[in-house]
Image (tube, helix red, strand yellow):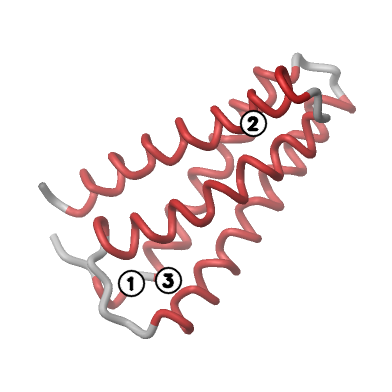
Amino acid sequence: MNQFSRFLLVGFANTALGYAVIFACMYFVGLSPELSNATGYTVGLLASYFLNRHFTFRSARRRSTEFVRFVLVFLTAYTANLIVLIVLVRGWEIHAALSQVIAGVVYIETAYLLNKRYVFHSTEVS
């Protein structure tokens, strides 16, 4: 399995986990869409780093440096995600579930590009 296939597999698993947490928080716990989103992405951050480091990119770099970069990328992608979510839910009054999915696409695209180019760039395996 090549690196891109592994990335897609990790992304699918991580996305499913993140959305499960987000929707559980919104519909079973009663949290706001924004707080549910933050909770889901926090759980997803930890799972994503572990899986991408060990399975996708098979990184041997120093964990502390790499994790700091990973968190910076996460914060950038999450900020883009949250801005889109707030605009859709609060500004345009689009249904919260649909807004979560649209904002998630923005997050995925941003995170993939920055992880590939900035975090794990020197450990790429075809």
Q: In this view, does 73 lie to the left or right of 24?
A: left
Residue at horizontal 43 percent and vertical 62 percent from the top: 115
Amino acid residing under circle 2: Ile
Who is closer to the viewer here, 20 or 76? Answer: 20
Residue at horizontal 62 percent and vertical 51 percent from the top: 42
Which is in the foreground here, disc 1 or disc 2?
2
Of callouts 3 and 2, the N-terminal one: 2
Of callouts 1 and 2, the N-terminal one: 2
Count neighbours of disc 3 (C-alpha within 10 A) and say few if under 14, some if 14 to 19, many if 20 or more: many
The residue at which mark 3 appears reads as: 119
Q: Within the image, what quadrant is residue 90 found in? A: top right
Q: In this view, does 11 lie to the left or right of 15?
A: left
Which label is found at residue 9? Answer: none
Count neighbours of disc 2 (C-alpha within 10 A) and say few if under 14, some if 14 to 19, many if 20 or more: many
Who is closer to the viewer here, 67 or 122? Answer: 67
Q: Within the image, what quadrant is residue 93 found in? A: top right
How much space separates mark 3 and mark 1, taking CA atoms? Answer: 6 Å
Outermost front residue: 29
SS class, disc 1? helix
Which label is found at residue 121? Answer: 1
Question: Is label 3 in contact with label 1 (beta carbons under 8 Å)?
Answer: yes
Image position, residue 58 (x, y; %): 23, 67
Tell me how many marks there are. 3
In the image, residue 98 above or below residue 22: above
Question: Is label 1 in contact with label 2 (beta carbons under 8 Å)?
Answer: no
Which label is found at residue 22? Answer: 2
How much space separates mark 3 and mark 2, taking CA atoms? Answer: 26 Å
Image position, residue 67 (x, y; %): 49, 73
Amino acid residing under circle 3: Val
